[in-house]
Amino acid sequence: MTGKQRNNLLQKTQMNNIDKHLEYVDDISIIFDQNKADGKTILTQINNRDKHLEFKLLEEENNTINYLDLSIHRNTNSIDLGIYRKPTHTDIIIQFSSNHPYKHKLATFKVYANRLLVLPITKQAKQQEWKIILAIAQNNGFPLHIIHNLKKKLTAKKQKLPTTTIQQPKIG
C-alpha cells in the first residue's frame, strides 16, 4: 500500500476527528481526541476499506505508547520520549573479535549513540540508554573505551557550528 493509498484510506475514515497521523513503512500512528472519536470505530472503518489489510489497535497503557523505537509518555502538559526496545530484542551484534571490517563493527554503536544524542529524551532516559549501550558493547567483547570515544566524537560533531558562509554571486 502506497502512502497515497493510506492517506486516501484515512481521509475516508472520520478524518475530521483525527488530529494527526504519522507513518513509517507499515506503522501508522493516529492521534485523536477520545471525546470526539472512538479508536475501535476508526479501526473498524479502516479495516472495512480493504479486505487484504488488517490494522490492529494499540492503545496507551499508563499514558504510554510505543511507536517504532520510541516510547512516548503523555503527561498533563507535556510529552516525554524514551527509547523503546521490543521484548524480543537481544543484545547480539557483530562480535568485536569477528573478522568483519572495523567500520561494520562500530555501525550499531554509531546508530545507538547518535540516537541517544539527537532525540529529545529525558536526562534519566539518556543515562539508562547509555548503560544499555555499554552493556551491549561489553556483552559483545568491545573494549568500552572505544564506545566512549565514539560517543565523544559524535558529541563534538553535533556541537560544531557551521563555519561556512554563503557568498552572493557576482553580477557583471
Image: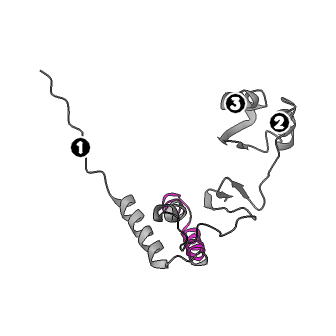
Name the foreground residue: 63 vs 30: 30
Element class at badge 1: loop
Give how far across and how far down residue 101 sits, in percent. Answer: 48, 63
From what the image shows, is residue 100 above or below residue 43? below
Q: Do labels 2 and 1 touch, CB within 8 Å?
A: no
User: Was residue 55 drawn as part of the magenta stretch in this picture?
Assistant: no
* Residue appearing at x 68%, y 40% in the figure: 21
Amino acid type, label 3: Asn
Q: Secondary structure at mark 3?
A: helix
Q: Which residue is mark 2?
A: 53
Q: Which mark is residue 7?
A: 3
The answer to which of marks 2 and 1 sits earlier in the sequence is: 2
- The kind of secondary structure the magenta stretch mainly shows is helix
Which residue in the protein does label 1 denote? 165
Residue 13 image position (x, y, % from top left): 79, 30
Q: Which residues are magenta?
A: 113-137
The amino acid on which the numbered mark 1 sits, given as a three-letter code, is Thr
Seen from this angle, which residue lies furthest front? 99
